[in-house]
Structures are given as structure tokens and as C-alpha cells.
Amino acid sequence: MAQLAGDEVEFRDWEESLRRPFDPSCERVPHDGGLIWALRSRSLDHLETAEEVRERALLLIDRLNGALSLEAGTQPLKFDAVVRIDDQGVSRRYIFAEISEKMRATTMALAEARDRAGNRVLRRRHRAHKS
């Protein structure tokens, strides 16, 4: 299953819209003495590695964010970790380090003309003549 990150209001909308037996489903599950929000799906159950679960979960989350945004006006939730529960009921979290950079650039061009001696040449403004 995939642990989700986001706002509590959005979790409530996801929980309401994605209840079991719906697949995928969103619910709170116990982890380390507390509760976490998780996305469960049969499509994640057969995957071997945490990396495979993460990749599939990212696709599911992206689709569900779009669908629930249209249906309920929710803001997007994000993938937080892969959670595996073993046969003894012990859960383990697999956290992935991600680097996200956002760059914004603004370009401004300034041109000036110079004569042979290096003096700046001012542009003359042309005025429209009235007849």
C-alpha cells in the first residue's frame, strides 16, 4: 500500500469517495502506534519491490487526484511512502528521497547604439505630423 501526504480535509473526501470494496480504497491504517492514511489497491499487492509499488502508486494517485478534483473539488494528495505489512502484522515503511527543483527565469534585453568613438547614440523619436 502507499502512504499518502496532504491535508486532512482532502483525506476525508478521499475516504468518503474511495471506501472498500472500491478498488483502490483510501483508509487510515495502524502504523507505529498511530494511524496513517493509506491507498490500497489489488494492483499493488502482487508487486515485488517497493520501487515497483511506488511507481504504480504514483500513477494511481495522479489519476485519483484528477478524478476527485472534478468530482469533489479536492486538492491533490501526494505519495509519501510504501508501507508493507508482513504475515505477523508488522508494518514497514519505505521512504524514497526525491529532489525537486523549480526554477524561474526572467530575461530582459537592453540594446544601445554607439558611434565609432564609443559614445552612446541616442535614438531620435519620430513625431507624427498633423496636416
Image: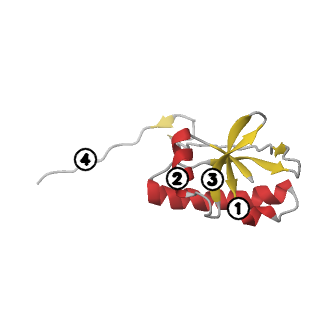
First in sequence: mark 2 vs mark 1: 2
Q: Are marks 2 and 1 in contact (CB under 8 Å)?
A: no
Q: Along the polypeptide, which appears first: circle 1 or circle 4?
A: 1
Q: Secondary structure at mark 1?
A: loop
Q: Which mark is residue 41?
A: 1
Q: Quadrant of the C terminus?
A: bottom left
The residue at the point 84 percent across, 54 percent down is: 50
User: What residue is pinned by disc 4?
Assistant: 127
From the viewer's perspective, is residue 75 above or below residue 49?
above
Circle 2 residue: 16
Is label 3 or label 4 in front?
3
Helix, strand or loop for disc 2: helix
Is residue 95 in view?
A: yes
Q: Which residue is mark 3?
A: 26
Q: Quadrant of the N terminus?
A: bottom right
What is the spatial separation of the Cα atoms under label 2 and label 4, in whole angstroms? 68 Å
- Asked if the residue at tag 3 contacts the one at tag 1, i.e. Cβ–Cβ closer than 8 Å, the answer is no
Is residue 114 among what the camera can see?
no
Image-quadrant location for residue 58: bottom right
- As drawn, which residue projects farthest toward the front? 88
The one nearer the camera, 96 or 90, is 90
Give the distance between the C-alpha atoms of the residues marked 3 and 2, in whole angstroms: 8 Å
Q: Residue at x 88, y 61 (%)?
A: 48
